[in-house]
Amino acid sequence: MKLSLDKIFDIFATKGHTQYGGEPITQLEHGLQSATLAKEYSASSELITACLFHDLGHLLHDLGENPTEQAIDDRHEYEGANCLEQIFSPAITEPIRLHVDAKRYLCAINPNYRASLSQNSESSLILQGGAFSSETAAIFIAQPYAKDAVKLRIWDDRAKIVGLTTPDLNSFVAIAKSCQQNNS
Ligand SMILES: [Fe+2]
Ligand SMILES: [Fe+2]
């Protein structure tokens, strides 16, 4: 699927009101909260943009708002990353591609992390293959961009606060455009 950056923003503006999985916020609120956390932690423009768009894949399919409820893994990390790689560098697409595996990694290295997951995130974890073994966790974190994926994941997990005020979608346009490649 080849989409322009304007079209990606348009998808969030028009479809972002849908519910974020089984969570009590919308997809747009979730992306904005993730990107705002990245900004607050002085992340690079690439990682802020990755946070904003990390769940784009959920907005590209017709499986409904919460495929996990139907025991379906929508593989949104791949759908989103594949779509965005026509516009952005691996500094953006790879943390997105790896953000589900980052959850499996964090579950492997920190039992408290797994206990802190929301109900929907725990259910999707099972569909996504469960926690990594210690061997797979070591292989995962040695990959390029895996550490950025872990940062994204930690902000992702926190970005579920009902009613939180954040900067709006337009305020992230300049940051995303500064990361654009190939003038797509
Ligand atoms: Fe996700
Ligand atoms: Fe997310």
Image (spheres, rainbow, N blue to C red):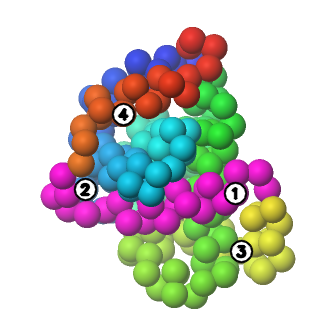
What secondary structure is found at the residue carrying circle 1?
Answer: helix
The image shows residue 85 at horizontal and vertical percentages of 64, 29
Disc 3 marks which amino acid? Answer: Phe
Give yes or no for contact between labels 1 and 3 (Cβ–Cβ under 8 Å).
Answer: no
Q: In the image, what residue type sits under mark 2?
A: Ile
Residue bearing mark 2: 25
Residue at image mark 4:
172
Q: Nearer the viewer, residue 172 or 25?
A: 172
* Rendered location of residue 164, percent (x, y): 20, 57
* Residue carrying label 1: 146
Give the residue at x 48% y 74%.
122
Q: Is residue 149 visible?
A: yes
Asked whether disc 2 touches disc 1, contact meaning CB atoms under 8 Å apart, the reply is: no
Q: In which quarter of the image is the N terminus?
A: top right
Dot 2 or dot 1: first in sequence order is: 2
Within-10-Å neighbours for mark 2: few <14, some 14–19, many 20+: some
What is the CA distance from the residue labelled 1 to the residue labelled 3? Answer: 14 Å
Label total for image: 4
The quadrant of the rendering that contains the C terminus is top right
Q: Which residue is drawn at 36% across and 33% down?
A: 172
- Residue shown at 69%/37% (left/top)? 90
Could you tell whether 149 is left or right of 177 in the image? right
Tags 2 and 4 in contact by the CB under 8 Å rule? no
Which structural element holds mark 3?
loop
In the structure shown, which secondary structural element does the residue marked by tag 2 occupy?
loop
Q: Report the Cα–Cα distance between label 1 and label 4.
A: 24 Å
Q: What stretch is highlighted in magenta?
A: 143-165
